[in-house]
Amino acid sequence: MGIIPVPRVAVVVVAAGSGTRLSAGAPKAFVGIDDRSVLRHALDGVARAPLAQVVVVVPAGREGDARTEADAAFGDRSELVTVVVGGDTRQRSVAAGLRALWADVETVLIHDAARALTPPAVFERVIAEVERTGAGVVPARPVVDTLKRVAGADVEAAVDRAPLVAAQTPQGFPRALLDRAYADATADYTDDTALVAASGHPIRTVDGDDLSFKITTPADLERARHLLRPIAPAASALPLVGIGTDVHAFGGDGPLRLAGLEWPRETGLRGHSDGDAVAHAIVDAVLAAAGLGDIGTHFGVDRPEYAGAAGIVFLQRVRQLVAEAGLAIGNVSVQVQANRPRFAPRRAEAEGVLTAALGAPVSVAATTTDGLGFTGAGEGVSATAVALVYRIR
Ligand code: CTP
Ligand code: MG
């Protein structure tokens, strides 16, 4: 069969039941959990388990639907999957599946499609234990409820749950053992290890999984839906926040450049660059949020190309650095503390220039400090910015 090696393991997925207790208007295997059916989820799990021939057993008339689900789950390995029609009991459905096994198969797992969320590791454990022991193998979970033996509504006795386990699927067997037990079976059993045990063969347990619960009732289907729903945004989807401050003293050469604007009749600020404390606070806030270091990392005195550069140039470069890191800037809020210049008349203009340079909304607020501190004394300007960035890839 093409380039796929002939598997020594087979998984029979029984999906031919009607789903009476679920009563969802369709055979249970074809009821949707999310955008995928019970059967599709079951087959997705089998497709992630070790390589095996897969026999899907479905109600008469559903062969085409099952083929579509199998092709979607197995992709270029869909030639591993055979679809057959089941019988009117689970046991007859399993028997129909066994008749479709390939000659080379030595280990057979029987799995309920209704246990749609079974993790692939359970398949691995069952296969390993069958191959190690030659016994029948059932994945099992401890019983959690306290058990009672009853007659109608009357409790007859407490039942010690310590020696009891709940049986799940896939149940695994050496193929010859299972074929013989099925050929000899004279009664109807609810699972395959019960049938094989009745013919006198040893059965071992391995750890099952809580996710292997059987979808039987509407509440079970809700549980499966809930488990598949993402419950919280991934950490990477949370926004990242950063803070930056900057201070420059008045007394530089030339006119004041602040918040991306020139202020012709105001005293300039001293600095390696143009001393634009507002732009520099924004740079630090954005870099901090993005985890990309700080202003000195990218524009320090060891970068002579930025000597005397306008704060706007820094913002344009930061925008680029953030994009290259797979991030986008949400917004920035910056507050200036200074006696001069008076921001109110030009605030909208400043916001427009900063927003255009950064490629994200920047809001600017300004305040004086009631004559206190170096800003109150008119010695310099202080700015504080908060930035939000978020991951886009
Ligand atoms: N099954 C089967 N053929 C049957 C009956 C059951 O292949 N004649 C399969 C079901 O499709 C299911 C598994 O055996 O994957 C376990 O059976 P159960 O949970 O009882 O499913 P249903 O029989 O479909 O449900 P209900 O008993 O509520 O009708
Ligand atoms: Mg049933």
Image (tube, grey):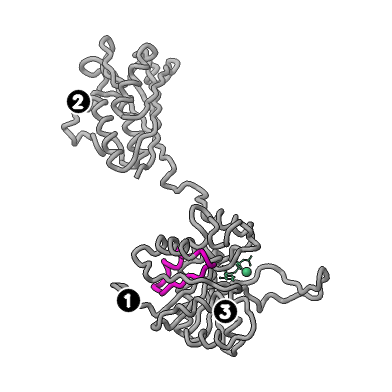
Query: Is disc 1 placed on a helix, strand or loop?
Result: loop
Residue at the right extreme, as displayed: 154
Residue 42 seen anywhere in this rendered image of the structure: yes
Query: Is disc 2 placed on a helix, strand or loop?
Result: loop
Q: Amino acid at mark 1?
A: Pro
Residue at the left extreme, as displayed: 304
Residue 71 is situated, as x and y percent measured from the top left of the image, at 40, 63
Looking at the image, which is closer to me, 208 or 172?
Answer: 172
Residue occupying image coordinates x 55% and y 87%: 183
Q: How many marks?
A: 3
Q: Earlier in the sequence, mark 1 or mark 3?
A: 1
- Quadrant location, the N terminus: bottom left
The residue at label 1 has a CB less than 8 Å from ligand 1: no
Residue 11 is situated, as x and y percent measured from the top left of the image, at 46, 74
For residue 327, side relative to residue 209 (left or right): left
Residue occupying image coordinates x 18% and y 28%: 307
Residue neighbourhood size for the residue with mark 2, other residues' Cα within 10 Å, grouped as few (<14), some (14–19), many (≥20)? few
Is 48 magenta? The answer is: yes
Residue 333 is situated, as x and y percent measured from the top left of the image, at 40, 27
Residue occupying image coordinates x 56% and y 65%: 114
Q: Which residue is mark 2?
A: 308
Determine the image quadrant of residue 239: top left
The CA distance from mark 2 to mark 1 is 69 Å
Residue 117 seen anywhere in this rendered image of the structure: no
Q: Which residue is mark 1?
A: 5
Q: Amino acid at mark 2?
A: Gly
Q: Which residue is mark 3?
A: 192
Q: Amino acid at mark 3?
A: Asp
